């Protein structure tokens, strides 16, 4: 009894180019594979007020185009937390304004890392320490001082 596998498509990567065979037709790429490089790497420290929010940028280029994801300090993939944190279409991490009572330590005081990945490689950013502060109410104190000296009466 003989066994065989039929492949409809085959992609082979070799050094800086790749070959693809689909339905008996062979193609060779003229575009070299290129690992991700950051176009906009996020900063080390991001501090913002809860009433303003912030956007932490991250974008990368490469061939093929890399996908950008965010990870927490322990390597967990960042998921959207409605109203508090979400990954934008352009790879940036968005922290919208939030009420003081919605503060979450795991979201607003955390270490993140941007990761860009394609078939040619993977690239991680430096650690990004995010700290959200709350805007405290402030008051103006108006003092009116009347000074009277003896003999001015």
Image (tube, helix red, strand yellow):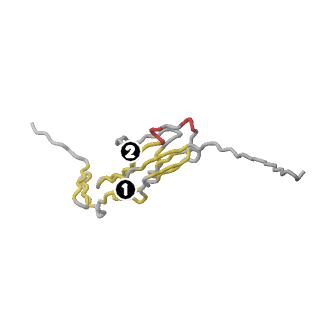
Looking at the image, residue 7 sits to the left or right of residue 68; the answer is left
- At 36% across and 40% down in the image, what residue appears? 76
x and y percentages locating residue 102 in the rendered image: 54, 36
- At 22% across and 58% down in the image, what residue appears? 14
Residues packed near mark 1 inside 10 Å, few (<14), some (14 to 19) or many (20 plus): some
x and y percentages locating residue 100 in the rendered image: 57, 38
- At 31% across and 58% down in the image, what residue appears? 35
Looking at the image, residue 16 sits to the left or right of residue 69; the answer is left
| C-alpha separation, residue under disc 2 versus residue under disc 1 | 19 Å
Residue at the extreme left of the image, as rendered: 1
Residue at the extreme front of the image, as rendered: 151
Quarter-of-image position of residue 18? bottom left
User: Mark 2 and 1 residues: CB-CB less than 8 Å, in contact?
Assistant: no
Q: Which residue is mark 2?
A: 71
Q: Which mark is residue 117?
A: none
x and y percentages locating residue 124 in the rendered image: 35, 52
x and y percentages locating residue 90 in the rendered image: 46, 52
Q: Nearer the viewer, mark 2 or mark 1?
A: 2
Q: Label 2: state its secondary structure.
A: strand
Q: Nearer the viewer, residue 25 or 108?
A: 108
Q: Which residue is mark 1?
A: 65
- At 72% across and 45% down in the image, what residue appears? 141
Residues packed near mark 2 inside 10 Å, few (<14), some (14 to 19) or many (20 plus): some
Quarter-of-image position of residue 66? bottom left
Residue at the extreme right of the image, as rendered: 153
Looking at the image, residue 44 sits to the left or right of residue 28; the answer is right
Q: Nearer the viewer, residue 133 or 147?
A: 147
| Count of number-bearing discs | 2
Q: Label 1: state its secondary structure.
A: loop
Q: Earlier in the sequence, mark 2 or mark 1?
A: 1
Indicate the quadrant containing the N terminus: top left, top right, bottom left or bottom right. Answer: top left
């Amino acid at each position: 009894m003989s066994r065989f596998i039929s492949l409809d498509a085959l992609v082979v990567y070799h050094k800086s180019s790749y070959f693809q065979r689909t339905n008996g037709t062979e193609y060779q790429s003229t575009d070299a594979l290129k690992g991700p490089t950051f176009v906009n790497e996020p900063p080390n420290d991001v501090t913002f007020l809860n009433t303003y929010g912030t956007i932490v940028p991250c974008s990368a280029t490469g061939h093929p185009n890399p996908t950008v994801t965010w990870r927490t300090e322990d390597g967990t993939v960042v998921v959207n937390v409605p109203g508090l944190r979400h990954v934008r279409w352009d790879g940036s991490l968005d922290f919208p304004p939030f009420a003081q009572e919605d503060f979450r330590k795991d979201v607003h005081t955390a270490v993140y890392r941007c990761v860009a990945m394609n078939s040619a490689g993977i690239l991680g950013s430096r650690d990004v320490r995010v700290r959200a502060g709350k805007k405290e109410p402030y008051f103006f104190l108006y003092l009116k001082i009347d000074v009277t000296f003896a003999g001015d009466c």
